[in-house]
Amino acid sequence: MKSCHLLVCACLFAFCACSLSAQDITEIDKNFRVAKVGKLSVHYFNALKAPFEVTGFPWWNGKGPLYRIPENFTEKEVNRGVLALARHTSGGTVRFKTDSPYLTIRADYRSFSNMNHMPRTGSAGFDLYTVGDDGKELYLTTIQPSLQNRNKTLEQRFNSVPRGKVRAYTLYLPLYSGVQNLEIGVKPGSQILPPDPQKIRKPVLFYGSSITQGGCASRPANNYTTMLCRAVDAPQINLGFSGSAKGEIALAEAIGKLDLAVFVMDYDYNAPNAAHLAKTHEPFFQAVRKANPDLPVIMLSKCSWISPERRDIIRKTYENAVKAGDKKVWFIDGNELFGEAGQNMCTVDHCHPNDLGFYMMYRRVLPVLKEALAAGK
């Protein structure tokens, strides 16, 4: 009887083992699936989930497509342009560490911009940086989408990825396109680790126009806002909305509720006229200041199509704050932003900066940002 019982158990064990082996492990855990990118074997991981760190979307709950403003906002709070452009991923990053000797990307666009005056590498591309031996971020490569990627999954290898050890990486997301699925591919068996904390833990938030959003940088990391945050090692929140930053108070109130390192206010361009700017600029600032009494705030006037009238409206907001005893406000005259290079060399259309223009803006704003960060400690 005992031998019969042992025989039955052995048969049951063999049956279970057979059933388990018949079940493809890749159907249970998709991280075991091996894809092919060219001749490379690749394991893909969802880059919008841990251990990857996503920055730049303070109201995003970790589910669904990336979105830059509160999801409950409607046309009652902001204009239609903001609602549409909030889908674009300007200022967003994915940070991680890995020892993989190669990396790939697989992404689906929620929206895809292809403009006449801006390189597609900037409007829809991805920039990859690592940390060099000197401890500074080092540019590696840019993913270059084709027009076919409007409706077709983007899948490419990152060039120039170093080998040999665990490295930190930052992936900068498109300036004028939306991303709904994003995966990073590594060599099977490679480690994927969370990134180290940034030097400045709280984000720097920028609110402004198409220039703030990044038009017309040749690639995402060349926006002046991103150069600034990379220089001080701080997370960025980019609330640049092309043609649509109208100083709506609901967005000011939402900004005021965030825990920020510095707020940069740069929406001069998108106020339809000087009267609108005068009506909205100081109330916008005051709404943020009421919620955040100690937040350092930098105010900019526009860098092209200079208007002394509009500049003086912004300067007045600054001067009124200083007169009221506010010691954490700064004003930068937009006429100074392009420096010696000037308007003739710094734009693509007399309005939007090229890479040189963004670099000149970065160079002028950086010392003020450093001062503001020091004042906020």
Image (cartoon, rainbow, N blue to C red):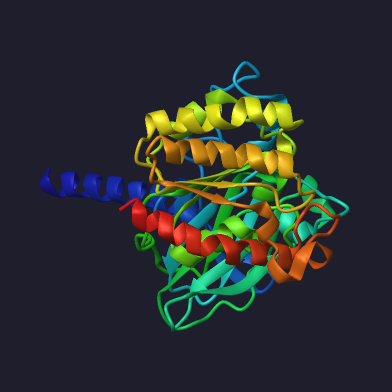
Q: Position of residue 138 (x, y in %)?
A: 54, 75
Looking at the image, which is closer to me, 110 or 172? 172
Image quarter (top left, top right, bottom left or bottom right) of the N terminus:
top left
Looking at the image, which is closer to me, 80 or 177? 80
Is residue 24 among the parts visible in the rendering?
A: no
Task: Give above or below for 57 relative to 142.
Answer: above
Q: Kindly give the residue lying farthest to the top in the view shown.
A: 76
Q: Position of residue 11 (x, y in %)?
A: 29, 48
Q: Quadrant of residue 242?
A: top right
- Residue drawn at point x = 30 percent, y = 53 percent: 377
Q: Kindly give the residue lying farthest to the front in the view shown.
A: 323
Is residue 197 among the parts visible in the rendering?
A: yes
80 sits left or right of 344 in the view: left
Q: Position of residue 123 (x, y in %)?
A: 74, 53
- Residue drawn at point x = 43 percent, y = 38 percent: 323
Q: Kindly give the residue lying farthest to the left in the view shown.
A: 2
173 sits left or right of 269 in the view: left
322 sits left or right of 358 in the view: left
Q: Position of residue 81 (x, y in %)?
A: 72, 30
Looking at the image, which is closer to me, 236 or 308? 308
Task: Give above or below for 173 relative to 320.
Answer: below
Looking at the image, which is closer to me, 34 or 210? 210
Q: Quadrant of residue 37?
A: bottom right
